[in-house]
Image: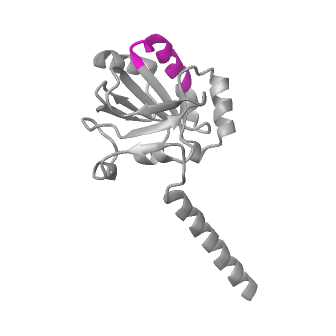
Amino acid sequence: MKRTIVFVVAACLLIAFAVFEFYSGKESKATATTNPADALEKPKEGYMAPAFTLQGLDERPYSIGGSRGKLLIVNFWASWCAPCEMEAPDLEALYKQYGDQVDLYGVNSTAFDRERDAREFVDAQKLSFPILMDRAGVATKLYKVDNFPTSLIIDPSGKVLERINGIITRKEWESRIEGYL
């Protein structure tokens, strides 16, 4: 009986420590800058997109936030997400169709995924657009992503035009992109 109590207490402490470590902000190569007042709610239409920089699968840094001169689509995904798998071919087609007018970044929420699985997903889907690795969950937390996929359309000045939770058809994507160009 005494051993069981000690074991349960030790397990609870270990779990509490793990949760604390996750939410206290692990060190990462990712950086984020935003107004603390804006961080209380999800980025939404008309608000400036929170800024962050993440390393891509190609080991280059990619930055989100601020002026960029092009429309930007940021898609948060995970390799285990069935809707993400369904959406991937459409995103690749959109990247090939609009790549000169629109920046498209896929953000793998690696803190909730395995990097090896993410790389296999990218290879299997033959994705050619930049894939950013959110290894510490900084961007996922900053953008308050609580389901996958979640996409944001951001105007050239850095304002959020639209937040899309879940998948939409390629025709819907095309209509929205054309409407913002």
Check residue 95 for magenta coloring.
Answer: yes
Question: Relative to 13, is 170 on the left or the right?
Answer: left
Check residue 45 for magenta coloring.
Answer: no
Q: Main secondary structure of the magenta part?
A: helix
Residue sitting at x 60%, y 27%: 58
Question: Relative to 17, is 146 on the left or the right?
Answer: left
Q: Residue furthest left?
A: 46
The N terminus appears in which quarter of the rendering?
bottom right
Q: Which residues are magenta?
A: 88-102
The answer to whether residue 1 is visible is: no
The C terminus appears in which quarter of the rendering?
top left
Place of residue 114 in the rendered image (x, y in percent of width and height, measured from the top left): 65, 42
Place of residue 69 in the rendered image (x, y in percent of width and height, measured from the top left): 33, 20
Question: Relative to 156, is 87 on the left or the right?
Answer: right
Residue 51 falls in which quadrant of the image? Answer: top left
Residue sitting at x 66%, y 72%: 11
User: What colouring style does the render use?
Assistant: one colour
Q: Count of labels shown? A: 0
**The one of 98 and 133 positioned closer to us in this rendering:** 133
Place of residue 15 in the rendered image (x, y in percent of width and height, measured from the top left): 61, 67
The answer to whether residue 178 is visible is: yes
Q: Residue furthest bottom?
A: 2
Q: Is residue 39 above or below residue 75?
A: below
Q: Is residue 71 above or below residue 9?
A: above
Residue 156 falls in which quadrant of the image? Answer: top left
Residue sitting at x 35%, y 40%: 50
Residue sitting at x 64%, y 79%: 9
Q: Is residue 175 above or below residue 64?
A: above
Place of residue 88 in the rendered image (x, y in percent of width and height, measured from the top left): 55, 25
Q: Is residue 103 above or below residue 10?
A: above
